[in-house]
Each structure stands twice: as structure tokens, then as C-alpha cells.
Image (cartoon, coloured by chain):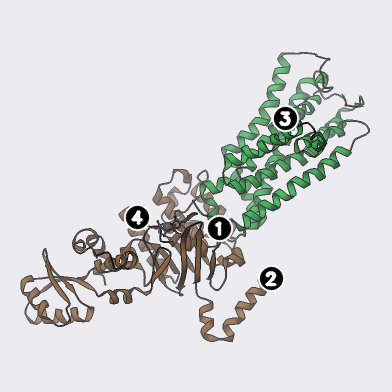
Chain colours: A green, B brown
Amino acid sequence: MTLTAYRWELRKLISQKRTYLGLGLVIVLPLFFVIFQNFHQRHDHGADNIFASQIGQSGLATPVLMLLFLSVFMLPLAAALVAGDIVAAEDGNGTLKTILTRSVNRGQIFAAKALAAMTYATIAVFLSALVATVGGVASWGFNHVVTYSGTVVSAPEALLLVFAANSVYLIPLLTVASIGVLLSTVTRNSAAAVVGTIGFTIVLLIIAQIPGLEGIRPYLLHEQYENWHGLLRTPTDWAPIWHSLWVCALYAGPALFAAYLVFLRRDVAGG
Amino acid sequence: MSDAASAATATLPAASAPAGAEETQPVKARGLVKRYDDVLAVDHIDLNVRTGDVYGFLGPNGAGKTTTLRMALGLITPTEGKVELFGRDPLRRGAAALEGVAGFVEAPRFYPYLTGRKNLELLAALDGAGAKERINEVLEVVDLAPRAKHKVGGYSHGMRQRLGIAAALLRRPRLLILDEPATGLDPAGMRDMRELIRRLAGEGITVLLSSHQLPEVQELCDRVAIVDKGRVVYEGALSELRRQGGAGYRLRTSDNERALALASAHGGIEQATSVDGYVRLQADERDVGALSVALGREGIAILALTPELATLEDLFFSLTEGPTSPTPSPSPTSGSGSASGSGQERT
Ligand SMILES: Nc1ncnc2c1ncn2[C@@H]1O[C@H](COP(=O)(O)OP(=O)(O)OP(=O)(O)O)[C@@H](O)[C@H]1O
Ligand SMILES: [Mg+2]
């Protein structure tokens, strides 16, 4: 039954404009980048990022650079856009009462919604990576790249690394989605939940700037957005990945659990 | 855990017969309370909807009808007390308590970006148990089949209301909970809705119908609960309520003047007054019957003799507004009389 509810959550997403707003954002940006670079062949070897300086040499540098750009704000925004809406929209429409008076329990509906929000975030990441990879390879070829450690990596291996980096980035991104689901459940207001989710990570960012609080930086959510960098060096640095895994679990676990409890008990009035 | 609970309730009826009959009661509320901060929306409500009832849940705006129905459907948690559907508490059993139960509170809501049919498909998927196969059938029942391919966002109020009924029927309910289903419908829509409810009741579905439309309740319901400010002020048979209030009748004859004189002199007729073109009688059914025989004997032809809705309305007001407010005496002729007429004359 949860699976049925999940399938329908996805169908609802497919039928909503908002869904395409987020996806559009994370597709259009890499497309723009590729097109712009094509017309404006700069070979700025002095770029501060090693992948930026390789754009013209290998198409596989593009998805890495794009992940670097989009991971900070755009992808979390896309994830928050749908996660923050997924419960609250039904509050606004009054459809929560419609689905909660059928033969599914609240827990199942909640699980379906949380899963759907995460599925969306996952699709956003890989769709964006796909566009960047195809665009990059089509423009600058399927060539080897040089990683952070200065190691030359063959094209197929680089492709695998791109995939792995995006997968690992899902750890913090699904955490953002979980927080979005929590705020969506608690605030019952899509806009508040979306803004709140993004606002939350920004607040953490500000806290990190407070003198004397530098010590907590490794435990802040946005720091985990870079957890995949360790994959792009030889030998692979697994430490940031493991670190982000447990740090993110500490954010996402309680958020999802709290959202679940609230959803189970809350009054469904209005609408 | 829930299996054990259901087993326990299942064995109860066998143990004691009279209690057993109660256990499968479609709706049983005991001491229901819902408080919103300082507002006591529902204040110790008891309800007894029995199998086969078309149960009217009457009350003025803000009486607590919707709030009570929300608690019955498990959408909100009672502050105190509990409600059971067929002996199952929706709070503890979740969706399992809603088995065989369908309906909506306030206006039924759907996904505006999906078509009517897609909405029903979604709900049928959440119902399981072959609900999907019934989609065409229920669309026919509510006369929405031609519009099923359009998005609900473009539906009129009446169409949404009918889609709400269709969605409920997908579940093949034994108990149908409807919260003011005819609100906002045009006269034809209202008539169709009543006809549909009557038909469904005829098929053996127990109906709990909240309303503040007296004609609707009078036409459809056999038992009622009247609520006011969160409290039940009357629960029982509609006929009993009417008897308590003393029935009013309208009489039109070939000779109203003599009829009035005869009625005034007739024992058992509490009051007889002449109101433009007819005689208004205050008496119970038996005495009115006796009067009609007497009129016939006197050679006065009875052209029309209809019970008057106004008395129920008066009763309703006196129950919900307290004895202090006077019953609006001259009203029956105009407003409610014409609307109620068609329903009344059939009795
Ligand atoms: N979610 C809520 N928060 C605060 N107060 C509420 C809430 N829901 C209902 N109430 C209050 O409870 C009381 C009963 O409301 P309810 O909607 O149950 O009335 P009703 O009998 O259905 O009225 P109507 O005929 O207008 O539909 C009202 O005073 C209302 O303001
Ligand atoms: Mg109401």
C-alpha cells in the first residue's frame, strides 16, 4: 500500500508545474554554461579550480564544475522546492482529508511523501549531471581529466567518478529534503517551508562565521555539500564521506522522525 | 496488536447479546469534546447512529457538526471522549476503522491539476479491493462521466460535490458520512442530491447527514440529533420530535369560514386561525384526522390538508435559541412554506 501511495505521489509531482521549475533550474544552468563556453572559448589556465582550467580539454570536467556550482545553492533549492511543498500543498488544497479517509494509514502516506521528495531530489541531481556530461562531452570530447591530486584519470574512469560524486552528494541533499519535509509538515505552508529550509542552511552558514564558533563548522550541513571532493583525488579520501554520512544522519534522522510523529498525530482541519 | 484488539471486540458481542447489538452500531459517540483554545467546539456529544438509519445531524452554523464528523473520521483528535465506527476507534485503529465507511467533511477536495477520473483512480488505488473497477459506475451514478476527462480545477461547485459522492461510493460504504452535501447546489442539484441519498439509503447504506436545511432533513431522515453550541439538545426520532412540538397543518376547503368555525369548536384542535386563503391548525395528527371526517360530514370539501414544516422550524429555533426567543409566528406562509411544500405533501 505504501508503494501504491508512493507511485501516486510521483504521479502528482509529474502533474504539477512546480516540479518542472526546480528541474528546469538545474538543467538550464549547465546548458547555459556549455553554450556560453562554446561561444566564448577562454582558456584561462589561471582558474583557481583545476577542473575549471580543464573545461576546454575534456568534456568530463563540465559535470564536476557544475556539481561544484549547483551543490551550494541550486540543487538544495530544487530539493527544498518540492520537499517543502509535499505535505503543505495538500494542507492548502484540503486534499489531506481526502486521502486520509481512504484505506491507507497516515504513516504510509507520510512514508510515500518523504520517499517521493527524496526521489525528486535524486532525479534533479542526476538529470543535472546528465545534461552537464552530455553537453560537456559533445563540446569538448570524452577525454581524460586531471584530478585534485594531479592524477590523470582515463575518460571512462572519470565518468564513473562523476557518477560517484553525484551519488555521494545525495547524502547532504536528501538531508535538505528531510528538513523540507519536516517544515512542510509543521508549518502547513509551502512558501514558509521552502524558505525555511533554505533559510536554515543559511543560518548555519552565518553561525559558522561567528568568531570563536569555527569549531562547529565541520558539523554544519552546508559543509557536507563538499563531501564528494575526496573522490576526485588519488588515493581516494573517504573521510569526508563517512563524516558527512553520520553528520547528515544526525540532521535527517530526527527531522524525519519528528515529521512522522507530527503527521501521525496532527489535526487535519481546514480545507 | 490491532489483530488482537479486533479479536477482542469480535468476541464481545457473542458474550452478551444486547451489548453485542451496540458493538456493530455504525456510529457511537460518547462524551465527545473538542476544545480549540477557548472555544469549546464540541461539548460532550453522544451520538447513536443505528444500522439503516438516515440520521440527520442538525444545527446552526458553528454548532460543532463538522468538528464532530472530523473526529468520527479520525481527522482530528478528540480532547475527551471517543467515537467508534462499527465498534472501531479511528484514533487507535487508523484506516482500519474506516473500513466500510466513506464520506467527506465540508466541501470535498480534490487535486485541481488532475482530471476527475485521475482523482478517482488515485483514491481507488488507496482503497484497493477492486475500487478501480467501480470508477465508471460511480461516475455514471453522479452523472459526471462526460466531464471525467477534464481537470477538477475547472469543475463547478456542484460538480465537485458530486465527485465527492462518487469518491465515497468507490468504497462501497456501509456507512456514508456527508457534511452538508447539498450546500451551494442549485434547486435541481439539491433535488438530485436528495434523490441520490434516498436511493443509497434504500440500498441499505446507513447515512449520517449533517445539515442546517430543515426540509432536507425532514425529507430524508428518520432520526436526528440537533446540536447547538457543541451540545446535543435533542436526539431521537424525527416523528417523536414533531409530536413533542405539536403538529401544525394547513387546511383549504370549499368553505373556509365554516371550516374555521367547525375547527375552533372541535375538541383536540388546540388552535385554528385563518391565514390568507387557508386555515391553520395546531393539533396532532389524530385530531386533524377526526376533524377531516367531521368536515366531510358537514358537506365541506377538503381541497388540501398538509402538515406544516414551520412547526419543526419553530422547534428547531426554540431548541437552538432557547425558550427566551419568541417563535417567529407569521413566517410559515412565506419563506419556508413554499420550499417545504413538495416534500411534505407526500406524507
Ligand atoms: N480548526 C479550528 N480552530 C479553531 N476553532 C475551530 C476550528 N474548527 C472549528 N472551530 C470552531 O468550532 C466551532 C464549531 O465549528 P464547526 O465547523 O464544527 O461548526 P458547524 O456546525 O460545522 O458549522 P457550519 O454549519 O457553519 O458548517 C466554531 O465555533 C468554530 O469556530
Ligand atoms: Mg460545518
Number of the front mark, 3 or 1: 3
Q: Chain of mark 4?
A: B
3D distance between C-alphas at marks 2 and 3:
48 Å
Q: Is residue A223 left or right of residue A107?
A: right
Residue pictured at 32% horizontal, 52% vertical: B186
Chain letter of disc 2 in the image: B
Give me the C-alpha separation between circle 1 and circle 4.
Answer: 26 Å
Mark 1 = which residue? B132
Disc 1 packing (10 Å; few <14; some 14–19; many ≥20): some
Which residue position is annotated with label 3?
Answer: A70
Q: Nearer the viewer, mark 2 or mark 1?
A: 2
Q: CA distance from mark 4 to mark 3?
A: 54 Å
Number of the front mark, 1 or 4: 4
Q: Above or below — where is B135 with respect to B326?
A: above
Q: Name the chain letter of the residue that bears numbered label 3.
A: A
Name the amino acid, label 3: Leu
The outermost residue toward the front is A212
State the image quarter where residue B269 is shown: bottom left
- Judged from the image, the secondary structure of the residue bearing numbered disc 4 is helix
Q: Which residue is rendered at x = 80% and y = 43% of the image? A: A247
B188 to A120, vertically: above or below: below
